Amino acid sequence: MKKYFLAAAVLTVLAGGVYAQEPSIPMGMFGGAPTNVKFDPYVAAPEGFDQEREGIDRGTVELIEYASESVGTTRKCNVYLPPKYDPKKKYSVLYLLHGIGGDEWEWMNDGGVPNIIMDNLYADKKVADMIVVMPNGRAAKNDSRDGGMGSFMAFNDFDKDLIGSLIPAIENKYSVYTDKNHRAIAGLSMGGGQSLNFGLANMDKFAYVGGFSSAPNTRTPQQLIPDVEKTKAENKLLWMVCGGADGLMSNSSRLKAFCDENGVPCTLIEYPQGEHNFVVWKYGLYNFAQLIFK
């Protein structure tokens, strides 16, 4: 109960930010990184990785609706389809989640440019065939950005909507694989915590899990990985990034420390002087997308 109230207090601060972007979290506000964590090497993304490029094929983004059994309403999500999407082929699926200040439009409209990043990666032949699903992570009938603290439990309950309704809807509408080895989940801030929580708790559904600047909704390492040997056997990728100047680094670093102590493969990159913003999260998507489904 104490942990719940602490998380709620932290999320109240997070929710107080401007809706158009996630709020910055000063280092030390909620604890820094453990000193014994060994970060994985940082390699800068190439210049222009997030800039629209001339002379390449482009994917498309479409807004779709699906019926949510757990929420009891019709919900929306954005779906990126790669260049020359062919319904006669099979594609893998990346579920890409937003933060507490966003919705299904945050990645697209608030600076994430996932379509541009993915188009460039496809042009350079650096990614496997996949579609990217960007849902609204608030599993509530009022899932708007102004939900405030009323959104806390809705974020926590999103796994029921994700697994029970959204994944079946995507698999019914698009030509995609339906096994765990062709399904990944990643997200920023609140969505990073959701991705770690839901991805590691459902390794029969997701083989690849990514957390970008994961927020305090992230469960403890012992909760995330109650069975070390099972995680070693079933998870194909556990990958995280967080800014070096981000006050939420402790959420990622404590999981990294636990994984290192227990021999669980895990990557955590410290983005140099990075803060709680899309500079880090775009870098996260760029790298994570290249590692999955291969």
Image (cartoon, rainbow, N blue to C red):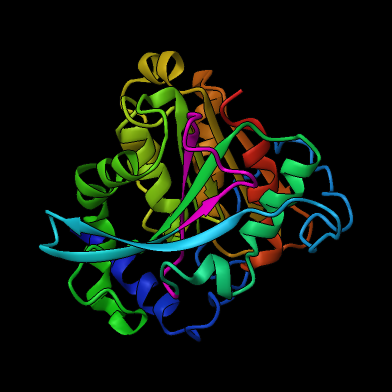
Q: Which residue occupies the extreme right position in the image?
A: 47
When the figure is inspected, residue 78 is found, relative to residue 159, above or below; the finding is below
Quarter of the figure that contains the C terminus: top right
Q: Residue 139 at x, y = what percent?
A: 23, 62
**Front-most of 12 and 135?**
135
**Front-most of 110 and 131?**
131
Using the rendered image of the protein, determine whether residue 114 is visible from the camera's viewpoint: yes
Quarter of the figure that contains the N terminus: bottom left
Image quadrant of residue 207? Answer: top left
Q: Residue 180 at x, y = what percent?
A: 38, 26
State how many labels appear. Answer: 0
The stretch drawn in magenta includes residue 91:
yes
- Give the overall secondary structure of the magenta segment: loop
**Front-most of 32 and 119?**
119
- Which segment did they paint magenta? 79-101
**Front-most of 24 and 144?**
144
Q: Residue 151 at x, y = what percent?
A: 26, 72
> What residue is shown at x 27% (from left), y 68% (from top)?
152
Residue 35 as seen in the image, left or right of residue 49: left
> What residue is shown at x 56% (from left), y 68% (from top)?
108
When the figure is inspected, residue 177 is found, relative to residue 123, above or below; the finding is above
> What residue is shown at x 74% (from left), y 35% (from top)?
126
> What residue is shown at x 36% (from left), y 57% (from top)?
217
Using the rendered image of the protein, determine whether residue 281 is visible from the camera's viewpoint: no
The stretch drawn in magenta includes residue 98:
yes
Q: Residue 21 at x, y = what percent?
A: 55, 78
When the figure is inspected, residue 179 is found, relative to residue 220, above or below; the finding is above
When the figure is inspected, residue 158 is found, relative to residue 239, above or below; the finding is below
